[in-house]
Amino acid sequence: MIVRFLGTHNAESRNTRLVSFLIDDILAVDAGSLASELSFPEQEKIKAILLSHGHYDHIRGIPAFVFNNWHHTTKVFATQQTLEILSSHLIDGVIYPKFTERTSFLEKPALELLTLEPLKSEDIEGYRVLALPVNHGIDTVGFEITSKDGKKIFYTGDTGPGLLSLWEHISPHVLIADVTFPNRFENVAKDAGHLCPEMLKLELVEFRRVKGYLPQVIVIHLSPKLEEEIKEEVQEIATELSCSIGIACEGEKLII
Protein backbone atom coordinates (compact mmCIF):
# COMPACT_ATOMS: atom_id res chain seq x y z
CA MET A 1 0.00 0.00 0.00
CA ILE A 2 1.38 3.41 -1.02
CA VAL A 3 -0.08 6.55 0.56
CA ARG A 4 0.66 9.78 -1.31
CA PHE A 5 -0.08 12.99 0.58
CA LEU A 6 -1.42 15.77 -1.65
CA GLY A 7 -2.44 18.25 1.06
CA THR A 8 -1.63 18.03 4.77
CA HIS A 9 -2.72 21.36 6.29
CA ASN A 10 -5.91 23.14 7.33
CA ALA A 11 -5.01 26.36 5.50
CA GLU A 12 -3.82 27.02 1.97
CA SER A 13 -0.84 29.09 0.86
CA ARG A 14 1.96 28.93 -1.67
CA ASN A 15 3.56 26.15 0.38
CA THR A 16 0.60 24.44 2.05
CA ARG A 17 -2.40 22.57 0.68
CA LEU A 18 -5.75 21.42 2.04
CA VAL A 19 -6.14 17.81 3.16
CA SER A 20 -6.25 15.04 0.59
CA PHE A 21 -4.28 11.86 0.01
CA LEU A 22 -4.21 8.94 -2.41
CA ILE A 23 -3.91 5.22 -1.82
CA ASP A 24 -2.14 3.31 -4.60
CA ASP A 25 -3.05 6.15 -6.99
CA ILE A 26 -6.67 4.93 -7.34
CA LEU A 27 -8.46 5.68 -4.05
CA ALA A 28 -8.67 9.31 -2.92
CA VAL A 29 -9.34 10.19 0.70
CA ASP A 30 -10.77 13.68 1.18
CA ALA A 31 -10.55 16.23 -1.60
CA GLY A 32 -9.15 19.53 -0.38
CA SER A 33 -6.38 19.48 -3.01
CA LEU A 34 -7.49 16.61 -5.18
CA ALA A 35 -7.21 18.31 -8.57
CA SER A 36 -4.60 21.01 -7.99
CA GLU A 37 -1.83 18.59 -6.95
CA LEU A 38 -2.28 16.00 -9.73
CA SER A 39 -1.65 15.93 -13.47
CA PHE A 40 -4.56 15.10 -15.77
CA PRO A 41 -3.30 11.52 -16.35
CA GLU A 42 -2.90 11.05 -12.57
CA GLN A 43 -6.45 12.25 -11.99
CA GLU A 44 -7.78 9.79 -14.56
CA LYS A 45 -6.44 6.87 -12.51
CA ILE A 46 -8.70 7.68 -9.55
CA LYS A 47 -11.62 5.27 -9.31
CA ALA A 48 -13.30 6.34 -6.06
CA ILE A 49 -13.24 9.14 -3.47
CA LEU A 50 -13.89 8.83 0.28
CA LEU A 51 -15.06 11.95 2.11
CA SER A 52 -14.73 12.14 5.89
CA HIS A 53 -17.14 15.08 6.28
CA GLY A 54 -18.62 18.07 4.53
CA HIS A 55 -16.41 20.97 5.62
CA TYR A 56 -15.14 23.00 2.68
CA ASP A 57 -11.45 22.21 3.14
CA HIS A 58 -12.21 18.49 2.68
CA ILE A 59 -14.59 18.66 -0.31
CA ARG A 60 -13.37 21.71 -2.24
CA GLY A 61 -11.53 19.79 -4.96
CA ILE A 62 -14.52 17.72 -6.08
CA PRO A 63 -15.91 20.12 -8.74
CA ALA A 64 -12.50 20.82 -10.29
CA PHE A 65 -11.76 17.10 -10.39
CA VAL A 66 -15.10 16.37 -12.08
CA PHE A 67 -14.62 19.09 -14.71
CA ASN A 68 -11.39 17.33 -15.67
CA ASN A 69 -12.88 13.82 -15.63
CA TRP A 70 -16.47 14.24 -16.82
CA HIS A 71 -16.09 11.54 -19.49
CA HIS A 72 -16.47 8.76 -16.92
CA THR A 73 -18.37 8.25 -13.67
CA THR A 74 -16.41 8.53 -10.42
CA LYS A 75 -17.88 7.10 -7.23
CA VAL A 76 -17.95 9.25 -4.09
CA PHE A 77 -18.51 7.51 -0.75
CA ALA A 78 -19.54 9.38 2.40
CA THR A 79 -22.23 9.54 5.05
CA GLN A 80 -25.65 10.75 3.99
CA GLN A 81 -25.17 14.16 5.63
CA THR A 82 -21.85 14.70 3.87
CA LEU A 83 -23.34 13.80 0.49
CA GLU A 84 -26.22 16.20 1.13
CA ILE A 85 -23.77 19.02 1.94
CA LEU A 86 -21.84 18.33 -1.26
CA SER A 87 -25.04 18.24 -3.33
CA SER A 88 -26.64 21.33 -1.81
CA HIS A 89 -23.60 23.60 -1.43
CA LEU A 90 -21.19 22.82 -4.28
CA ILE A 91 -22.68 20.68 -7.05
CA ASP A 92 -26.08 22.31 -6.64
CA GLY A 93 -26.71 23.53 -10.19
CA VAL A 94 -25.85 27.12 -9.18
CA ILE A 95 -22.26 27.23 -7.98
CA TYR A 96 -21.36 24.16 -10.06
CA PRO A 97 -23.43 21.86 -12.29
CA LYS A 98 -25.26 18.91 -10.83
CA PHE A 99 -22.65 16.39 -11.89
CA THR A 100 -24.82 13.55 -10.59
CA GLU A 101 -27.28 14.11 -13.43
CA ARG A 102 -27.14 13.78 -17.20
CA THR A 103 -26.97 17.25 -18.78
CA SER A 104 -26.58 18.84 -22.20
CA PHE A 105 -22.82 18.34 -22.01
CA LEU A 106 -22.77 15.16 -19.89
CA GLU A 107 -23.81 12.00 -21.70
CA LYS A 108 -23.98 10.30 -18.31
CA PRO A 109 -23.55 11.42 -14.69
CA ALA A 110 -19.93 12.26 -13.86
CA LEU A 111 -20.42 11.47 -10.17
CA GLU A 112 -22.21 8.67 -8.37
CA LEU A 113 -22.85 9.46 -4.70
CA LEU A 114 -22.95 6.38 -2.47
CA THR A 115 -23.83 6.34 1.21
CA LEU A 116 -21.51 4.78 3.75
CA GLU A 117 -23.02 3.43 6.94
CA PRO A 118 -20.77 3.79 10.01
CA LEU A 119 -19.55 0.49 11.51
CA LYS A 120 -20.45 -1.38 8.30
CA SER A 121 -17.49 -2.64 6.24
CA GLU A 122 -17.68 -2.02 2.48
CA ASP A 123 -15.67 -3.37 -0.46
CA ILE A 124 -14.53 -0.35 -2.47
CA GLU A 125 -12.27 -0.88 -5.48
CA GLY A 126 -10.61 -3.88 -3.85
CA TYR A 127 -10.17 -2.30 -0.41
CA ARG A 128 -12.17 -3.02 2.73
CA VAL A 129 -13.35 0.32 4.09
CA LEU A 130 -14.80 0.68 7.57
CA ALA A 131 -16.24 4.09 8.44
CA LEU A 132 -16.24 4.97 12.14
CA PRO A 133 -17.91 8.05 13.70
CA VAL A 134 -15.59 10.60 15.31
CA ASN A 135 -16.08 13.79 17.33
CA HIS A 136 -16.30 16.90 15.18
CA GLY A 137 -18.67 19.82 14.68
CA ILE A 138 -20.69 18.06 11.98
CA ASP A 139 -21.29 14.44 11.00
CA THR A 140 -17.76 13.06 10.50
CA VAL A 141 -16.18 9.64 10.12
CA GLY A 142 -12.70 8.21 10.11
CA PHE A 143 -11.75 5.34 7.83
CA GLU A 144 -9.94 2.08 8.37
CA ILE A 145 -8.77 1.03 4.92
CA THR A 146 -7.46 -2.50 4.35
CA SER A 147 -5.63 -3.57 1.18
CA LYS A 148 -5.85 -6.97 -0.46
CA ASP A 149 -2.60 -8.02 1.21
CA GLY A 150 -3.85 -7.07 4.67
CA LYS A 151 -2.10 -3.71 5.13
CA LYS A 152 -4.24 -1.33 7.19
CA ILE A 153 -4.37 2.38 7.84
CA PHE A 154 -6.78 4.34 10.01
CA TYR A 155 -7.43 7.98 9.15
CA THR A 156 -9.21 9.88 11.90
CA GLY A 157 -10.56 12.64 9.70
CA ASP A 158 -11.09 15.85 11.68
CA THR A 159 -11.68 14.78 15.27
CA GLY A 160 -11.61 15.93 18.85
CA PRO A 161 -10.85 13.72 21.86
CA GLY A 162 -12.85 10.61 22.75
CA LEU A 163 -11.63 7.95 20.32
CA LEU A 164 -11.54 5.13 22.89
CA SER A 165 -14.76 3.54 21.63
CA LEU A 166 -13.16 3.10 18.18
CA TRP A 167 -10.04 1.23 19.20
CA GLU A 168 -11.72 -2.15 19.66
CA HIS A 169 -12.92 -2.02 16.02
CA ILE A 170 -9.58 -1.40 14.29
CA SER A 171 -6.01 -2.75 14.14
CA PRO A 172 -4.08 -0.40 11.83
CA HIS A 173 -0.42 -0.58 10.91
CA VAL A 174 -0.48 3.21 10.45
CA LEU A 175 -2.65 5.82 12.19
CA ILE A 176 -3.09 9.12 10.31
CA ALA A 177 -4.33 11.55 12.97
CA ASP A 178 -5.65 15.10 13.07
CA VAL A 179 -3.44 17.40 15.17
CA THR A 180 -4.48 20.94 14.29
CA PHE A 181 -3.28 23.03 17.26
CA PRO A 182 -0.41 23.11 19.77
CA ASN A 183 -1.07 22.42 23.43
CA ARG A 184 -1.57 26.06 24.42
CA PHE A 185 -4.70 26.05 22.25
CA GLU A 186 -6.16 22.96 23.94
CA ASN A 187 -9.49 24.62 24.72
CA VAL A 188 -9.78 25.95 21.17
CA ALA A 189 -9.05 22.46 19.84
CA LYS A 190 -11.77 20.92 22.00
CA ASP A 191 -14.31 23.55 20.99
CA ALA A 192 -13.48 23.12 17.29
CA GLY A 193 -13.41 19.31 17.40
CA HIS A 194 -9.68 18.83 16.83
CA LEU A 195 -6.67 17.41 18.67
CA CYS A 196 -3.49 18.92 20.07
CA PRO A 197 -0.39 16.81 20.85
CA GLU A 198 -1.27 16.27 24.52
CA MET A 199 -4.75 15.06 23.58
CA LEU A 200 -3.25 12.76 20.95
CA LYS A 201 -0.97 11.32 23.64
CA LEU A 202 -3.95 10.42 25.81
CA GLU A 203 -5.69 8.76 22.87
CA LEU A 204 -2.55 6.74 22.08
CA VAL A 205 -2.17 5.65 25.70
CA GLU A 206 -5.71 4.27 25.54
CA PHE A 207 -5.01 2.63 22.19
CA ARG A 208 -2.01 0.78 23.62
CA ARG A 209 -3.99 -0.26 26.68
CA VAL A 210 -6.78 -1.71 24.52
CA LYS A 211 -4.74 -3.17 21.64
CA GLY A 212 -1.40 -3.94 23.27
CA TYR A 213 0.68 -2.05 20.71
CA LEU A 214 1.06 1.33 19.07
CA PRO A 215 0.94 1.76 15.27
CA GLN A 216 3.14 4.12 13.34
CA VAL A 217 1.51 7.55 13.69
CA ILE A 218 1.40 10.28 11.05
CA VAL A 219 0.07 13.72 12.00
CA ILE A 220 -2.03 15.66 9.48
CA HIS A 221 -4.26 18.80 9.24
CA LEU A 222 -1.70 21.07 10.90
CA SER A 223 -2.21 24.83 11.20
CA PRO A 224 0.71 26.20 9.15
CA LYS A 225 1.42 29.26 11.33
CA LEU A 226 1.63 27.01 14.41
CA GLU A 227 3.40 24.09 12.75
CA GLU A 228 6.84 24.42 14.35
CA GLU A 229 5.29 24.49 17.81
CA ILE A 230 3.17 21.44 17.00
CA LYS A 231 6.20 19.56 15.67
CA GLU A 232 8.18 20.15 18.86
CA GLU A 233 5.34 18.93 21.05
CA VAL A 234 4.71 15.90 18.83
CA GLN A 235 8.36 14.92 19.14
CA GLU A 236 8.08 15.16 22.92
CA ILE A 237 5.16 12.74 23.08
CA ALA A 238 6.88 10.39 20.62
CA THR A 239 9.84 10.23 22.99
CA GLU A 240 7.60 9.86 26.02
CA LEU A 241 5.62 6.98 24.47
CA SER A 242 8.64 5.43 22.68
CA CYS A 243 6.80 5.32 19.38
CA SER A 244 7.16 6.64 15.84
CA ILE A 245 5.21 9.83 15.13
CA GLY A 246 5.83 11.62 11.85
CA ILE A 247 4.51 14.82 10.29
CA ALA A 248 2.74 14.48 6.94
CA CYS A 249 4.17 16.71 4.21
CA GLU A 250 2.79 17.63 0.80
CA GLY A 251 4.20 15.35 -1.88
CA GLU A 252 5.41 12.72 0.58
CA LYS A 253 4.84 9.03 -0.11
CA LEU A 254 4.44 6.43 2.64
CA ILE A 255 4.94 2.77 1.81
CA ILE A 256 3.17 0.36 4.16
Image (cartoon, helix red, strand yellow):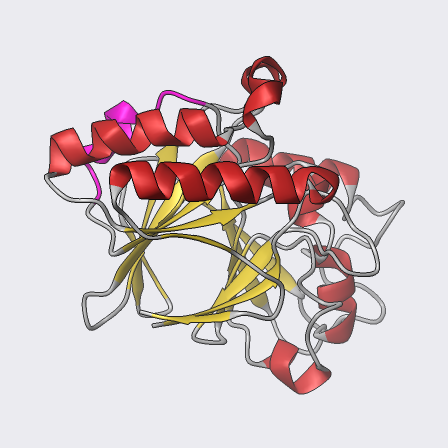
Q: Is residue 145 above or below residue 66?
A: above
Count numbered badges in the picture.
0
Report x, y in % for residue 33: 69, 59
For the record, the magenta segment spans: 161-170
Q: Nearer the viewer, residue 239 or 75?
A: 239
For the point 53% across and 35% down, the residue is 158
Q: Is residue 151 left or right of residue 160?
A: left
Would you place residue 211 above or below residue 26 in this image? above
| Residue 187 appears anywhere in the view | yes
For the C terminus, the quadrant is bottom left
Residue located farthest toward the bottom when viewing the structure as drawn: 41
Task: Residue at 84% x, 47% y: name it.
Answer: 93
Does residue 48 appear left or right of residue 69 in this picture? left
Tell me which residue sits at (71%, 82%) in the image.
Answer: 40
Q: Could you say which is closer to the camera, residue 115 or residue 133? A: 133
User: Is 54 one of the magenta-colored residues?
Assistant: no
Q: Is residue 165 magenta?
A: yes
Residue 134 in sight: no
